[in-house]
Amino acid sequence: MIKFSNSYAALPARFYVRQNPVPVEDPQLIAFNAPLAGDLGMVADRADEAALAAIFSGNAVPEGAEYLAMAYAGHQFGNFVPQLGDGRALLMGEVRGKDGGLYDIQLKGAGRTPFSRGGDGRAALGPVLREYLVSEAMHALGLPTTRALAAVTTGEKVYRDDGALPGAIMTRVAAGHVRIGTFQFFAARKDTEAVQILADYVIGRHYPDLHAEKNPYLALLEAVAVRQAALVAQWMGVGFIHGVMNTDNTAISGETIDYGPCAFMDSYDPHTVFSFIDEFGRYSYGNQPKIAQWNLARFAETLLPLMDEDAEKAVERAQETLSVFAQRFQEDWLEGMRAKIGLAQKEEGDMALLEELLQSMQEEKADFTLVFRLLCDVADSENIESGAQEKFEALFGNPRSIKTWLEKWQARLAREKAKPATRAAAMRKRNPAYIPRNHRVEQALNAAVREGDFKPFQTLQKVLAKPYQERSTYAEYEEPPRPEERVCRTFCGT
Ligand code: AMP
Ligand code: MG
């Protein structure tokens, strides 16, 4: 059914610990991503639920799987922890996708490993469903992300702060699970040989062209910085807040990884924080670019010994290379935001125009997603009769503040080449109608966890699978929460 490669298992023994999953009592399949399984070349029949549940709970070991827990370290909220590692995740192996790429298949919540420290190695159903929903929503939105292949309940309870909860296991697919923290694990042990082996491994897997570079490790730093810049710019564009941007949650592949207390912002405010553990707002929406840059500096430190024999020179070169991040982020962000407001050409004043809009949104607590989606209707001149402008203006507490902006924007659009209808259509591909709004996610999780009702979870999956395509049956999913529905705090629940 699955044909595994095991390139990570072929690395030196100190990169991981071999560990089989701990079987669970009563595995039940609650979600299976058949299209993804197909893309990964798996022969899987949804009808054979028991077999799938056995495999994706770790109860059955498919031929060729070589389970292992990866070693890594990481800066958590700025503090270095020299040993973290997969405390509840196990890499089964890798598969070759139909696109030619190699993908990790990982079970999350499969039992204790030597890296579990005080943890039970398990996952609760709520966080599993959250990761399933949000990672697939991110993919549908067009962002680089790990994917959700399957979710099973275990028939066992896990014990968390809020009591006994149903246990679950999530199967995650990633282009790669190597993190900045993986490099830090070896760098902290002054194991330069391992850092080099790891660097060569990720170059081979994610950046094969760099092997030909004069200084492939410096080039690797730059390539990773470029992908992080693109990634965080895209997060900003959809109002996504990762919530735990620790270096162990930053993937070298450039994918969004480790969905914990992540959430999408409703009303626009750069200070927005959802995560319960993020007391000081280190990982707030607006801080994300700065934090990505900080994390990249930690990555650079691990590569210094490979960059230049002369330590001072190495630092100089690393700093020079890192400056690429700020520049690329700025470019990517501006490109993305221009597209969101329907600008295909570049003009000097575009940045100011965008900043003015964001300023009004913040002052008037306007809903981030709706502002841009309804702006598409305003851009569509055929919609003039429809009251699109009034609806848009109503998103702002004081509509007068936005009227002046709309006039400036319309004057700017007059210098664009595209016809209004074409522009509006392009904008609708960059401004989602549906995002995993926090209150909807919470409702879906609660129904599943408290009542065993998976319907809201399944409906939300359908809504989020086509985020740019408005469907009248799902109109209510476009709406921000009513005051009593608002969810301001999220928990990782680990
Ligand atoms: P996370 O906050 O999920 O990124 O995890 C941070 C670290 O804690 C990683 O080393 C995880 O493997 C570990 N961890 C999280 N939850 C558990 C758990 N329930 N049991 C064991 N280890 C865990
Ligand atoms: Mg993590």
Image (cartoon, rainbow, N blue to C red):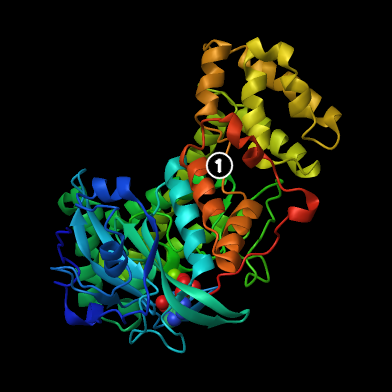
- Do we see residue 252 in this rendering? no
- Judging depth in this view, the residue of 376 and 298 nearest the camera is 376
Q: Residue at x 37, y 84 (%)?
A: 112
- Do we see residue 302 in this rendering? yes
Q: Residue at x 60, y 27 (%)?
A: 341
Q: Residue at x 80, y 35 (%)?
A: 396
Horizontal arrangement in the rendering, residue 326 relative to residue 176 (left or right):
right
Can you say whether 376 is above or below 459 in the image? above
On the rendered image, what quadrant is the N terminus found in?
bottom left
Dot 1 amino acid type: Gly
Can you say whether 21 is above or below 64 in the image? below
- Judging depth in this view, the residue of 86 and 1 nearest the camera is 1
The quarter of the image that holds ligand 2 is: bottom left
Where's residue 189, x and y in %? 31, 84
Q: Residue furthest bottom?
A: 118
- Judging depth in this view, the residue of 218 and 266 nearest the camera is 266
Where's residue 156, x and y in %? 45, 79
Can you say whether 246 is above or below 132 in the image? below
Horizontal arrangement in the rendering, residue 56 relative to residue 475 (left or right):
left
Where's residue 69, x and y in %? 29, 77
- Judging depth in this view, the residue of 352 and 129 nearest the camera is 129
Residue annotated with mark 1 = 237
Q: Residue at x 83, y 30 (%)?
A: 399
Mark 1 neighbour class, 10 Å CA radius: few under 14, some 14 to 19, many 20 or more: some
Question: Of helix, strand and loop, which one carries label 1?
Answer: helix
Where's residue 250, x and y in %? 42, 62
Ligand 2 contact, mark 1 (Cβ < 8 Å):
no
Q: How many marks?
A: 1
